[in-house]
Image: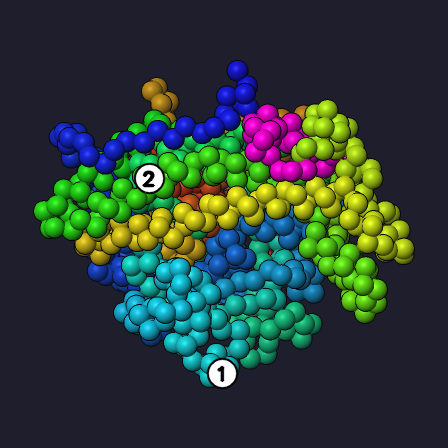
Amino acid sequence: MPFFSIFIIPNIKVKTATMKRSLVSLFLSILLISPLFADEGMWMIHLLRQQKLAEMQQMGLKLDDVDIYNPDGSSLKDAVVQFGRGCTGEVISPNGLVLTNHHCGYGQIQQHSTLERNYLEEGFWAMSPEEELPNPGLTVTFIEGIEEVTGWVKECLKRDREDDTEGLFYLSPSYLNQLARQKAGEQFLADHPGTEVEIKPFFDGNQYYLFTKKVYSDIRLVGAPPSAIGKFGADTDNWMWPRHTGDFSLFRVYADKDGNPAPYAASNVPLRPKRWLTISTAGVEEGDFAMILGFPGTTHAYYTSWEVAERRDIDNAVRIAMREVRQEAMLEAMLRDPAVKIQYASKYSGSTNGYKNAIGSSWAIDKRDFEQQKSVMQERLLEWAATNKQEKYGDALAAIERIVTERASLRYRSWMLTEAVLRGIEFAAVPTQTAEALSVALSENDQERIDALIDQLSDEFHQFNNKDYNREVDHKVARAMLKAYTDGVQQALQPTIFTVLHDRFSGDIDRFVDHLLDHSLFGNAEAMQQFMEHPSPESLRNDPLFGFARSVREESRTLQSELARFDTPFRLARRTLLEGLLAMEGEYALFPDANLTLRLTYGQVKGYRPRDGVVFTHQTTLDGVMEKEDPDNWEFVVPEKLKRLYREGDFEPYALPDGRMPVAFAATTHTTGGNSGSPVLNGSGHLIGINFDRNWEGVGGDITYLPDYQRSIIVDIRYVLFVIEKYAGANRLMEEMGLR
């Protein structure tokens, strides 16, 4: 039976928080709340001495905590950067050379690619500083300092409570960042160009930290292997182990002559960083200590059982079904036309990434019985609260259960609209707000405003109808997505524009989409240009794409507004729940959920057993690349030069003792999105690899760590150096890293 015929109304199965505890459930509760596994956790680096330093040293760390984070001097943290807004990178030379993943730099590599100079296919290597390519909009952020400000923030919240009408200042980024500027002082910010400050909440607003950052915006592309290396295995191998991908790229941070952040300028010079990483080519063995510094994005370690079910039955289920439809339509077009493949490579990759994540998450929820584990946690907290006469924690659990149940239908409709239409169809990005304002200005004959809004409309139109937009592909995708959406959401609950589909076009989606694109000034650049030359308010008001986009956005706003009424009680209940867990366990026993702040995780280089009779080792080699080669499959094409290097067998000084060339290794470290590009360090703090993925069996670690299954997938630094030196011949970079 197709998904859409049965998945009309979500059914969230919930379990009561009151249940008898068995010896098994007692064990599970201890496992859940008090980590038993050294590998578990995303720890704050300034608290290592209080929390994990001794354990790390027992496992093989040869450093002290001040070697990792030193508020009064240079340390490893100074060589770790946030790359863009969602990845990590590391500084590997005294000239600001930054190493990150190929997929983290993919958007920049794509933007520089054309059919004539296809850096995605051919790779890119700047053989001189003059050849390094600027990347407008890209930033690299250094963490200058971390300061706990919990007490001060709570005093400010008391001071400002009359203005906090919804009681949510405690989580508000705008409010907290105002406080950050107050704390730092405007004079400090004026005296330190490029410096930003941010206060982030932890444990759902029970703790607060102030981060001082230095943000650089002149970032230039230095090197990237071809996608056949940097994206080898593409979507088939994504989230999979064993892996054979050389997922890396190189950028450089530029600054003004004083070392301060500055916009791109020819006069800027390479940054002289406080610290850069030492690279080790000694390699890894099973059981070796490994640690990762980076900026993990989002985890849900303190979900309740009801949130776990909601994640599986709504969020993941919709994402899986809708993205499967979209990806099938995109891939068919990409395989037919090389130009389309360039245009849609990044879009397709981004879609499949979330798709496989959702599949792995739901697998873990079911196979590892996360609902039961969380129910046990809830029962344990209830018993502790009763003993300590803290009824509010039981009230918080009851509130979360009620809210999750009540919002289920709305949440499902919102996810369907977002995944199928707003995110799934490109022409849904028609700039309706500007078009609406222009229509009013045209009606009022306000020429000054008309001129300004026409320019703005043109700019916004070309933001989605750009060099990476293909009308025919969008047309094909739209037909598939609207079919999936209308099959999955009851007609009475669809946006009002869908009455046109059902009444005027008798439900014929192909004719409906043809009408939208063929009769719209937003349908192509020529139609938009004709409108610019002869604008009229009627052309906008009667435009079918304008009407479609406006209607689906209105529906989205309505759904978000209806869902928003649950936000305040839900967030307050979550804060109280985390307050209870911290009180029960002690503040140093737990790690806060990831929130794109700098964290450390550690573990061992290790393989795993995914299922009975199957054993995965910790290391892969270039042999596996050749075994996977398929010249008829774009995901597994191997460059001729790499095959020649393999045949020649000149792998020194990077070879394994048996002569094979290492490619990747796995470790038990606890990572998530945002850790892409993170440095993987040995016990001496030397760079041994670059984190780039997780195995899909370990994706559920965003909710509960899975010691038997969870593995970080890491590019062996020896493979990175092999590609730079022997494939690319980029000797100047080897010299810059001190390796020649």
Nearer to us in this view, 15 or 716: 15
Can residue 67 be seen at all in this image of the molecule? no
User: Within the image, what quadrant is residue 235 found in?
Assistant: top right
Q: x, y (%) of residue 21?
A: 15, 32
| Residue 142 lies within the magenta run | no
The residue positioned 51% from the left and 81% from the top of the image is 190
Q: Secondary structure at mark 2?
A: helix
**Dot 2 crowding, Cα within 10 Å, few <14, some 14–19, many 20+:** few
* Label at residue 402: 2
Residue type at numbered disc 1: Asp
Can residue 126 be seen at all in this image of the molecule? yes
In this rendering, the answer to whether 81 lies above or below 192 is: above
In this rendering, the answer to whether 626 lies above or below 381 is: above
Residues drawn in magenta = 472-497
Residue type at numbered disc 2: Arg
Name the side, left or right, on which 194 lies relative to 306.
right
Residue occupied by mark 1: 191
* CB contact under 8 Å: marks 2 and 1: no
